[in-house]
Image (cartoon, rainbow, N blue to C red):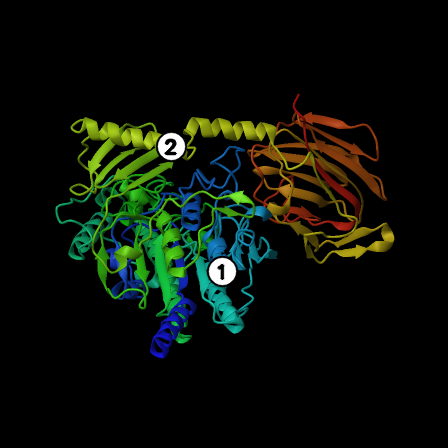
Amino acid sequence: MKRVTSLTCLLLSLLIVHAVKRPNIVVLFADDMGYSDIGCFGSEIETPNLDGLAANGLRFTHFYNTGRCCPSRASILTGLYSHQADIGHMAGETGVRGYRDRLSFNAVTLAEVLGSAGYHTIMTGKWHLGWRDEGSPTARGFQHFYGTRGYIDSYFTIVPRTEIYLGEELVIPVTDKPINHLHPDQEWYTTDVFTDYAIHFIDEVRKQDDKPFFLYLAYNAPHFPLHAKPEDTKKYRGRYRDGWEGFRKNRHERLKELGMLNKSWPLSALDVPKWETLTEQQRDDMDFKMALFAAIIDRLDQNVGRVVDHLKKIGELDNTLLVFVSDNGGTKETGLFGIKGDKHTVDNYKDWARVGGWSSSYGQGWANLSNTPFREYKRENHEGGVSAPFVIHWPKGFKAKGELRHQVAHLIDLMPTFVEVSGAKYPKSFKGKPIQEMEGRSLVPFLDSKRTESRTLFWEHEGNRAVREGAWKLVGSRNGPWELYDASRDRTELNNLASAEPQKFASLKKKWDDWAKRVHVMTPEEYSEARKAFRRAAPLKGPTVRMDFKGKPLRFMNKGVVVDKKAKPAWQFNGKSWLDLPRDRAPGLFGSRTIRYTGRFHSKNANGVILAHGGDRMGLSVYLSDGKLSFAQCADWKRKVITSTRLGAGEHSFEAVRHADGRMTLSIDGGQSQSVKAGLIGLDPGDSLQIGADTVKPVGEYEVPNQFNGTIRDLKIEVERVESN
C-alpha cells in the first residue's frame, strides 16, 4: 500500500511539474509577405534565422491566411473567420454585424484566453483592429502593450493613425523624430523598436515569476513604404538586374527541390510585362526597389534572430512554441512600378527615402515574384493572395526537425492549438457575453505525424471568395465567375474544371453560400451601402460628445502649454507649444453631425491656429490669418473657408459650427453669423485634434504648424447627432 501511495505521489508530482512547465507561446507576424519571400520557402533573400527555425522545426506547405491585413489579424487572435470577429472588411464601422471598427465582444482573443489561464500576455507592434479605447490591445487581454493601435505607414517616423502607445498611454504622437525610450541613442526603426520592447517585456515578466508568457509580435515589415536601412540595402543592390522572370523560375525550382511543391505543378503565367520591355532606367529603378524590399525582409529576419537568441539566453527557447506567419500575399495594389513609380526613382531616392504614407512600393512585377508559384495577390482568394509561409518551432513539444507538413491549415487553427498546449479553457461566455465556438482545429496531432486530414475552409474579402474542401477549391474574383481546381494536381490554379465537374461545383457553391450566410458576409454593394448609411446616421454612444476642458488637458498630450488658473482658467501658448489629442480619443467628424466649437482667445500675433482636427483631406480648423478669424473645412481635399473682418485688439469670443445639413457658420463676439454651404465630411480624419497648432497637414489656408501665441480659454467642443424622426 505504501509503495502504491508513493507511486501515486510520484505520478502526481510529475503531472504538477508538467503543468508548471507549460510552454511559452510566441507569434511572429509579418505584414504583406508572399509565400516564397523567405529562404526556407524558396527565396534568394537571406533569412538565416527563419531558415534555422525551419531546420529545427516544421514548415506547413498548405497554410492559409485571409488575404488581407485586418481580417487576418482578427482570425489569428480569435480563432474565428474574420466576419465572425466583426472584421469582415477592414477595421471600419458600419453599425452592421460582421463589419465593425473593433473585434466582436462575442469573441475572445488569444490574450484573453491565455491570460485567464495564468499566462503573461504581451503584444508589441501593429494592432490595426480598432483605435477606440474599448477595442484596444489592453482592452482585449494584453497586459503589456507597446505599438500602434492603427496601421503603420512609416518605419522611421510617426505619421497620423500610427501614434505609439505604451499600455493605454500615448507616448509618441505624430513626429518626424520619434525616440526609442529603451535605447535613445539608436535610430528609430519600427522593426528594431518592436523587438526591443518584446524583449523588454519578456524580461519584465520574468522578474515577476516563472509563469509562461504569450508574446504576439506583429511587425509592419515588409509592408510598404520601402523604408530600409542603408547597410541592409547595400547587400541587395544590383542583385535583381536580371528581372522578375528568372527569379520566379528560380524560386519555383527551389520550392520543388525542397519538396514543398509537387513537381508536376507548373509555374503560373507571368502577368506583367517582360523585363526586357522596360527601359534601362526602369530596370535600374526596379532593381533598386526590390533591393529595398529584400533589405526590409533581411532586417525582419535579423530581429527574429534577436528574439530567438534572447529566448536561448534566458533558457526559455526549448519550451517556447514559436510560430512565424504572414497576413497576406504580396500586393499589386499600386501597379507595375509601385506607388508613385514614375516620380520616385533611384536618382531622387534621397527625396523619398523616409517619406511615410503611400509614398513607395515594389510594384506588381516583384509582387508576382513574392507569390511564386501562385496566381494573384493580396486581397484575392486565389493561392497567391492567401497562401502563407508558416514555420513552427518547439524543441520540447515535438521530435521532428526540418520536416514538411502538407496538412491544410489556417490562422484560425492557432487558437485551438494554443488552448491545447497551454491547458487553457476556451470559454462559452466572457465578461457576460456569449462566445462563439472556435472554427479551427488544433495542429498538435500533425506535429509529430505526417498524416493529413480532409477539411473545409472558407474565404471572402471585397467580393473575392473561395472554399476549399479536401483537394477541391472553388474560387472567384470580385465580379468574376467561379473557378474550380483540383489542388492535388493543380495548386497553381491553371486548369479550371468548373464546366467539367458540375456536381462538385454545385456542392461547393452551396457550402460557400451557406457559410456566407452563417458568418454574415455582405456583398461589396451591400457593404458600400452600409457604410453610406452609417455615415449618414453617424451613431454615437449617447446623443452628445462634449469636451469641457476647464483648463485641464484631459487626455491631451501637453506640448509645453501653461495652465493659468487665475485667468478663469486659461491656457497660455507661446508660439511653440500646443495640445495634441490622438484621433482615437477625439470625437468623430463624419456624417450628419452638428459640430460646434466655442471659446475665447487673446492673441499676440495676427496668425495662428486655435483648433485643428484633421488635415487637408478631411478636417475642421479655426484659426487667425492676418488678424482675421477663419473657419475651414476640408472634405475629400475640397476646402471651404469663412473669414471674418479684421479683429480689434483684446479678447474675442467665437462660435464656429458645421451644421448637420452641411452649412458652416462663424460668429464673433456674439455678432451675426456668416454662413457658407460646405457639405459633410465622409471619413474621420487621420490627423489628431490639436489646440494651438496644426502640425501635420493643414486644414486651413496656412502652412503648418502655424502655432498660436496667446491665451485660449473656455474652449468647448460639441459633436451632436441630428435625431431622426
Q: Nearer the viewer, residue 547 or 348?
A: 547
Note whether 395 is above or below 589 in the view shown: below
Q: What residue is shown with label 1?
A: 121
Judge left or right: residue 40 versus residue 321: left
**Quadrant housing residue 237:** bottom left
Point out residue 372 in the picture as x, y percentages from the top left corner. Answer: 24, 48
For the N terminus, the quadrant is bottom left
Q: Is residue 601 visible to the viewer in this orientation of the structure?
A: yes
Q: Of helix, strand and loop, which one carries label 2?
A: helix
Point out residue 536 in the picture as x, y percentages from the top left corner. Answer: 59, 27
Q: What residue is shown with label 2?
A: 516
Q: Which residue lies furthest to the bottom in this view?
A: 2
How far is mark 1 from mark 2, CA to CA?
33 Å
Note whether 218 is above or below 90 in the view shown: below
Judge left or right: residue 33 versus residue 546: left
Q: Of helix, strand and loop, which one carries label 1?
A: strand
Q: Nearer the viewer, residue 312 or 79?
A: 79
Whether the residues at callouts 1 and 2 have beta carbons within 8 Å, the answer is no
* Marks 1 and 2, the one that precedes in the sequence: 1
Q: Is residue 239 visible to the viewer in this orientation of the structure?
A: no
Q: Which residue lies furthest to the front in this view?
A: 1
**Quadrant housing residue 212:** bottom left
For the C terminus, the quadrant is top right
Q: In the image, what residue type sits under mark 2?
A: Ala
Which residue is rendered at x = 33% and y = 34% of the image?
465
Judge left or right: residue 608 versus residue 686: right
Q: In the image, what residue type sits under mark 1?
A: Thr
